[in-house]
Amino acid sequence: MQIDDADLIIIGAGPAGLTAAQYGARANLRTLVFERLAPGGQVLTIDVLENYPGNVGEDSGHPRSGFEFARDLHRQALEFGASFTNVQVEALKKEGDFFAVTLENGETKRAAALILATGAAHRTLGIPGEAEFTGRGVSYCAVCDGPFFRNKKIVVAGGGDAACDEAQYLSRLSSQVILVHRRDRFRAQEALVERVRNNPHIEVRLNTIVWEVRGEQTLRSLVLECNAGTGRTYTEDADALFVFAGAVPQTSLVPGAEKDVAGYIITDQRMESSIPGLFAAGDVRSSPFRQVVVAAAEGAIAAHCAAEYISAGNTGRKADPALPGDARA
């Protein structure tokens, strides 16, 4: 049976989706990518992508920004023949051997295999005032909003890699950065923690919880609890609160796929989910380590194995899972 729309559909164009698009197109698959925002996903918010292997600019000798990295991934995928559409996917279901994807404009596209690379959304603190002051002092992206608070007093909430990275970035804009974490130790990689502790512009407060955001037209202060669990609170004047409290996997399109206790999609080593032909890659997938390099690798594996899945089926198409050129590239 011949497929009219595509061989492979990819939902999401972060590093996982962009890499999958490149490898899918290289495998001679008609590859469609749907992304509701700009190609790149959360990597667009990374100021300096310093820990991606080989990511050093040819002229400057310095690592490229997340924006530059995403731009180049997108360009590569386009050059190999992948097609991108800026659109919201409203629904996804499997119809026989094919996947049907319904778009916000009412169109339906079908493909023999699908890669879900929808990533994860920022987790909120869920405290009074947070929603009201989002965009008016509360932010979830330091690169996006940090420049608005140059030389202002900034509080960062979180204890993982993102919180430490973003606190470092913000400390270049202001000498008054306070990093608060609810636990007695950070979850971030030790190298990142060490940099934070040695940064004279960052004050670290462990065992500290943000309970409330206060202000008028914009954020003016925060209610913090010291020595978490004691109930002893105090008011801290602040101009901004940057929240990095983890993420929520975007899996609403596939309620029937097997997930772990945190809601991430479980796959085998081929990136295939519990639904045959449905692959997952990047931050939406259950993984012990979420980094750009991991997402890109998972996207490549997912596309390669999707090509094999299509070749093994009766879809009227034959992919080239060996990939033209060097398959290790």
Image (cartoon, rainbow, N blue to C red):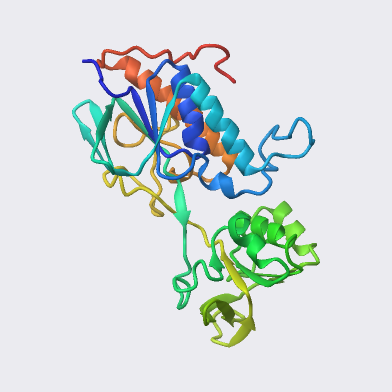
Q: Please say whether residue 102 is visible from this viewpoint.
A: yes
- In the depicted structure, whether residue 296 falls above or below residue 303: below
Name the side, left or right, on which 23 lies relative to 319.
right
In the image, what residue occupies the spot 34% across and 12% down?
Answer: 318
- The percent position of residue 11, horizontal first and vertical second, equals 38, 37
Quadrant, the N terminus: top left
In the image, what residue occupies the spot 41% across and 24% down?
Answer: 305
- Figure quadrant of residue 193: bottom right
In the image, what residue occupies the spot 50% across and 44% down?
Answer: 41
Outermost residue toward the left in this view? 96
Name the side, left or right, on which 66 lies relative to 92.
right
Q: Please say whether residue 290 is visible from this viewpoint.
A: no
Q: Nearer the viewer, residue 126 or 41?
A: 41
- The percent position of residue 303, horizontal first and vertical second, equals 44, 26
- In the depicted structure, whether residue 67 falls above or below residue 243: above
Quadrant, the C terminus: top right
- Figure quadrant of residue 112: top left
Q: Nearer the viewer, residue 59 or 302?
A: 59
- In the depicted structure, whether residue 72 falls above or below residue 262: above
- The percent position of residue 49, horizontal first and vertical second, equals 66, 43
- The percent position of residue 22, horizontal first and vertical second, equals 49, 25
Total labels drawn? 0
Name the side, left or right, on which 297 lies relative to 238.
left
